[in-house]
Structure formats: C-alpha cells, structure tokens
Amino acid sequence: MANHRADLRGIARRVMIERGFLPDFSSEAMAELARIETAATEWDSNIRDLTGLLWASIDNDDSQDLDQLTVAESHPDRSVSILVAIADVDALVMKESALDTHAKHNTTSVYTAGDMFPMLPEKLSTDLTSLHEGQDRLAIVVEIEIAEDGAVLSSTLFRALVHNHAKLAYNSVAAWLAGEAGAPEWLDVVPGLDAQLRLQDQVAQRLKARRHEQGALSLETIEPKVVFNGEMLTDLRVEQKNCAKELIEEFMIAANQATVSYLKGKGISSFHRILHSPERWQRIREFAARWNGHLPQEPNARALESFLVTRRKADPLTFPDVSLAIVKLIGRGEYVLDQSTGVSPEHFGLAVKGYTHSTAPNRRFPDLITQRLIKAALAGAATPYRPEELKSLADHCTEQEHNAEKVERQLRKSAAALLLESRIGQRFDAIVTGASDRSTWVRILEPPVEGRLVTGERGLDVGDKVWVELLSTDIERGFIDFVRVGL
C-alpha cells in the first residue's frame, strides 16, 4: 500500500540536504539535550511574578512550540496596555553550545509537507522552552501602551515568570469572535477569558487600521496545507486569514517595534528586519495599469495599498495571484545590522520603521540572537555578540531563510504533483498566475495547485481565466504541466 507521507518525507530530507541544511542533530547536541531534564528555574529579584495575569496562547491547532502568550489591560483614559510574553529559550540553549551551533547553522525550523525539521529538538521547542498551558515559564515580556487611535504611547521590556492559562487555536477563536460558532472550551474553564479576548481583538483592529492608513500592504497569497488520512495524502487545503491570526500578527509587529526601540535606546547594535522600497517600482506601475491602477512615479506604499484594496473588491478570486505578482516585484525581506542612532530603516510591506524579529526564539535564530541582546541589556552586561559577528549572522540568516522558503515551496509542489498523479487527462478551470517570455503559469481552482502551461500560452496575462488539461506530473521534482484546451 502506498505511503505518501513517507514518500514526501524522503523528498524533504533530500531537498534539505541539497539546500545546505542539517536535517538531524549531531551526537554532541543530543548529548547536551540528554543533560537537560527540566525547564529553567532561574530566579532573582529582577524577574517579576506575572503568573496571576490571564495569559493565553493562540496558535495553530497542532502547534506545540508555543513562543508567545498575550494579555491586555484597559485604562480609564481608554488606552490599553498589551503584554507579549516571549519564551526564554536562551535560559536553556547557551551561546556556542552544540544545540546553539545547530540552530545557528539552520537558523530556522523548516515546515514541509513531508516533515517538520525543528531548529531545536522537540524536547525543548515543544516542551521545556515552550509556553505550554498549565506551566510556569520564564519569559521576556514586552509591555506596550496603545492609545484609542492605535498610536503607541510607550513601551518597556522586562523579565518575568508567566503561566499559560489556556491553549487556544486561531480558527475556533476567530469563529467565536465573528459570532459564527460557540465559545472555545477554554472560555468556560477560565473566568474572564472571553472579555480578555474581545479586548485584545479590539486593540489589534486599532493597530491594524493605523498601519494600513500608513500604507501597510493587504497582500494575500495562497499556500495550501497538506491533508492526510493516515499515511495517504487526500487534499490540499487553503488556510484563510482571520481576526485571531490578525490579533497575533498585530501584537507581534508592535512587540518587535518596541524591541528595536528598547535596544536602540540602550545604544546596542541589533538585527533589523527590512523590506526595501521596491527597485522595480516601474514594473509594479505597469502591472497596476493593466487594471486601470494609477500609481505615482516614485514608490508609494499608500498608493499601492489603495490599488490592492480596489482589486480585492473587484475580483477576490484572482486577488491572490495579483498579490503574488506584487510580492515577486517588491522583492524579499532581509536581516541587516543597524548600528545607527537615528531613524531606523523601513519595512515597506508593513509600513513600519524599526522592526525586527524577536517573538519566535523556538523557531528562528534571529529571534534567539535578539533575545540574548535584550537579556544582556536588562542585566547591564556586556553585549554577547560583536558587531562584525552580527553582520555575518544577519547575512547568513537571510540566506538560510531564502533556502528554507525554497525547500518548503519544493515540497508544496511535490505534494501537489502527488495529489494529481492519478488525474492525468482531467480538465480544470484555471487562472493565469504568471506570464513572461520564458514561461506561463496557471493555478487550478480545486484543488488549489499551480503548474506550468506548456501549450496555448500565447496572449495570456496574469488574472486571465482559462480551461486546461493536466498533461503530466513529476513528484520528485514537483513539476506539473498543463495544456490549454477549448481554444
């Protein structure tokens, strides 16, 4: 009997190695791991006891590597303080240890259709350094006061002991907040959690509205997740955005900005996450003009956001493909070392200045680096990384992030080819997702799979709707070829 999961796992390991990743931990790292038996219990007068606050996590249904907890407190002037607790991974993963060396090499957990390759062993990332429900854990807490209009009034960072009172999932929380489903079971167990979540949702929507007024981009691309029945691949399912995901996204953006502000205030060089103003802005202008979108001569995030909002309203079916084209033209984000004392570099897509990655130290090495910088600053200790070391690490983390994206994209393609291998000759409705002199790509609607159009591509452009027939698949390489029919 076929074992699709095993097939994809084998492809994933091969591609990981080809892209320069270590799919397994070294014997030295595993020996270190064996000596770690409990969560960190370090305690001193500088660590606050905040276990009594109504902390909760919101993540994917199956996530166990919980990096953040959130809670909010309202004030008489209608401002709200949001607190984000970030797992203190550094308390167990020491700099230059064998575990740290593995994390520094891979720099990220890699999530593929075949397997998940964690940056840190699961004994740590899903247990001893995870902010599990019902457990007291050490954390870095970012506290931010938000005005009624979504403006940040103040922020501070400190160490604390926290307790996760409820492990919540995006989809069930979002459905409850939208009035589309009953309350998640935790809301019946933990008094006051329902009001707490509604308050957090209100604050997140304030933050979101303010960012989009400033030009944050409403991009929406399709990255379907695999669905297995036992060991057999049965479907690819698109995960939709929802208000619970937006809640966490907005709080993490605010926490990352507050972290940059704190480190800059201490005069500490740190990683920034930036997305440059697009060099291919003229191409973006030409692309928008196909739908009568008029963008200015110079890059302007607010104008681009206005075009995106208009396109989504006009044709939500093809909007993900328009988004993908814009994403490709804008380019990739990157990590850079910022040693300036003035205005921080900008993230064009988020419409924020002074942004880093700090909220997922179980999953991303840049976040673990930033955590070590924060802890040194809080303790008044020497910075654990030299500037030249940080510069080298920023370049390496950027490169490995791009490699991880390639691995994950390859496995999505291999899973799609595997799902379609028995459907050669079938015909599908499709949308053109990419068109150039070299190749034309289409996305069929059900299942949501992209492939190359090998005949009948003349005259097509992004967003065009076509009728295609599946010609061939190559699971190992993730190739899917279609021909156009009905000409």
Image (spheres, rainbow, N blue to C red):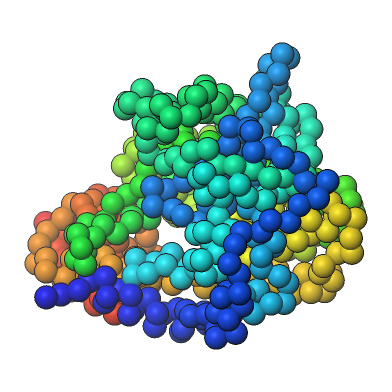
Which of these two is toward me, 79 or 215? Answer: 79
Q: Residue at x 58, y 67 (%)?
A: 37
Q: Residue at x 66, y 59 (%)?
A: 40
Q: Residue at x 37, y 32 (%)?
A: 185
Quadrant of the drawing holding the C terminus: bottom left
With respect to residue 44, does 209 lie above or below? above
Which of these two is toward me, 125 or 36? Answer: 36
Query: In the shown orientation, is residue 368 left or right of residue 130?
Result: right
Query: In the shown orientation, is residue 69 left or right of residue 415?
Result: right
Q: Position of residue 64 (x, y in %)?
A: 46, 55
Q: Position of residue 49 (x, y in %)?
A: 72, 40
Q: Please count the marks in the image.
A: 0
Residue positioned most to the top:
76
Quadrant of the drawing holding the N terminus: bottom left
Q: Position of residue 129 (x, y in %)?
A: 59, 58
Q: Position of residue 77 (x, y in %)?
A: 73, 14
Residue positioned most to the left:
425
Residue 383 makes an appearance in the image: yes
Residue 340 makes an appearance in the image: no
Q: Residue at x 79, y 32 (%)?
A: 154
